[in-house]
Image (tube, rainbow, N blue to C red):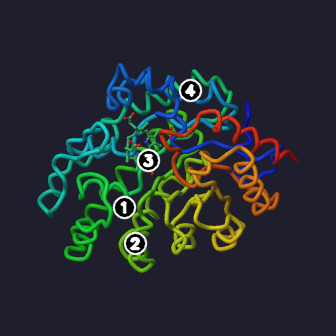
């Protein structure tokens, strides 16, 4: 098996830097678009055969070093009783958002059996991968999930989310605690179904001040990592806009800390501490640049990683739907070539 991804997560020596891309299965690939033309996003997620097939699409096409199970961070919210829709062109919408104590009390405290279809997709994807590369499982972190549950979709300023946090902190903590427990159980099930590493996506947590992160988020994230430690697989902790809270994210947990493209990788790593691995951090929009410019940027990131054990190459955030597919392939080859030990 190609295990350089797992080795880098554990800060062991590798033959070259492993690479995978967040959202590597998706609309920039014609193979995905043609399957998606026949099925809704939710039915792709809920049909394990299809989810496993989509998981493998980028692996069949590119020399990536890890696969990530095809699902979405919002699936647990649906299982908890929120009406989720992936609306054409406007992203996810929740039709009955959480705005009050009564709404939080009304959420179903699921134990994970409701998401058995994801565990089954993990089993099928593992089988289809047949040891070629490791399979990553994932979930959204409580803050990012709460922001969708409260706002009812994506947001610019998180006014409703922060208002609930500041106005009714006990309701906020009740919601976050519930989400943390659901996420822990859900990730444990993915690991037991065969996920060989886990990524926790706190994509939007960078909208918070360092003080608010410490008070309203960190203890809940800590609970998740503490609950998964004994499972024995590498845990990746990712967020964007997190330059001011990287140290706190490390303290909250994770063997590997995700770094977005805004920071220099060496500066971020020094803050995180060299006793943790890091993942990142090419700007997703850099994949639209000419290949010589992609090469220059990859070279800079690798130079900043300094040949140290414990670097997983990735984008600073998910790959965008209009990314030129040949540039994805070229970037992966450049990363492998320039990092060859
Ligand atoms: O990485 C992978 O290949 C695995 C699949 C994956 C998806 N969503 C599939 C998806 C993963 C890891 C996610 C995570 C996710 N989902 C996050 C965290 C990562 C990040 O990018 O910050 C978030 C915030 C979501 C919520 C979500 N789902 C949004 C905001 C959107 C719409 C945005 C868009 O690109 O349209 C989705 C829909 C979604 N999730 C799609 C895919 C492939 C597009 C659905 C389609 O085909 O129409």
Q: Are marks 2 and 4 in contact (CB under 8 Å)?
A: no
Q: Are marks 2 and 3 in contact (CB under 8 Å)?
A: no
**Place of residue 73 in the rendered image (x, y in percent of width and height, measured from the top left):** 39, 45
**Place of residue 328 in the rendered image (x, y in percent of width and height, measured from the top left):** 63, 38
Q: Are marks 3 and 4 in contact (CB under 8 Å)?
A: no
Q: Residue furthest bottom?
A: 211
- The residue tagged 1 is 143
- The residue tagged 2 is 208
Q: Are marks 1 and 2 in contact (CB under 8 Å)?
A: yes
Q: CA distance from mark 2 to mark 3?
A: 20 Å
Residue 260 sits in which quadrant? Answer: bottom right
Nearer the observer: mark 3 or 4; the answer is: 4
Looking at the image, which is closer to me, 181 or 48? 48
Residue at horizontal 81 percent and vertical 48 percent from the top: 339
Q: Residues within 10 Å of mark 1 (few under 14, many from 20)?
A: many
Q: Residue furthest right?
A: 341
Q: Which mark is residue 56?
A: 4
Q: Residue furthest front?
A: 290
- The residue tagged 3 is 139
Is 28 placed above or below 171 here? above
Whichever of callouts 1 and 2 sits on the residue coming sooner in the sequence is 1
Badge 3 marks a residue whose secondary structure is strand
Name the side, left or right, on which 81 lies relative to 91.
left
Residue at horizontal 70 percent and vertical 32 percent from the top: 63
**Place of residue 206 in the rendered image (x, y in percent of width and height, measured from the top left):** 45, 67
Badge 4 marks a residue whose secondary structure is helix
């Amino acid at each position: 098996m190609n295990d350089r991804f797992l080795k880098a997560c554990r800060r062991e020596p590798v033959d070259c830097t492993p690479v995978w891309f967040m959202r590597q299965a998706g609309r920039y690939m014609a193979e995905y678009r043609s399957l998606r033309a026949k099925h809704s996003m939710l039915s792709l997620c809920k049909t394990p055969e299809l989810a496993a097939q989509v998981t493998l699409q980028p692996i069949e096409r590119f020399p990536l070093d890890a696969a990530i199970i095809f699902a979405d961070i919002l699936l647990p919210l649906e299982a908890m009783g929120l009406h989720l829709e992936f609306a054409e062109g406007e992203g996810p919408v929740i039709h009955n958002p959480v705005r009050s104590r009564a709404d939080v009390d009304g959420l179903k405290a699921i134990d994970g059996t409701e998401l058995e279809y994801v565990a089954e997709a993990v089993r099928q994807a593992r089988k289809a991968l047949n040891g070629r590369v490791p399979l990553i499982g994932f979930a959204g972190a409580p803050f990012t999930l709460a922001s969708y549950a409260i706002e009812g979709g994506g947001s610019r300023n998180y006014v409703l989310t922060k208002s609930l946090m500041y106005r009714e902190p006990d309701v906020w903590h009740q919601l976050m605690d519930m989400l943390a427990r659901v996420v822990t159980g859900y990730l444990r099930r993915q690991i037991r179904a065969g996920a060989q590493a886990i990524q926790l996506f706190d994509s939007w947590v960078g909208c918070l001040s360092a003080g608010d992160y410490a008070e309203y988020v960190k203890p809940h994230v800590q609970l998740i990592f503490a609950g998964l430690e004994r499972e024995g697989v590498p845990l990746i902790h990712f967020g964007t806009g997190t330059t001011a809270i990287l140290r706190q994210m490390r303290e909250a947990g994770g063997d590997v800390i995700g770094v977005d493209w805004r920071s220099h990788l060496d500066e971020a790593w020094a803050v995180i501490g060299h006793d943790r691995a890091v993942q990142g951090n090419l700007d997703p929009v850099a994949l639209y640049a000419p290949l010589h410019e992609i090469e220059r940027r990859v070279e800079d990131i690798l130079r900043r990683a300094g040949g140290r054990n414990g670097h997983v190459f990735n984008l600073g955030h998910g790959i965008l739907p209009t990314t030129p597919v040949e540039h994805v392939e070229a970037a992966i080859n450049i990363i492998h070539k320039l990092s060859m030990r």
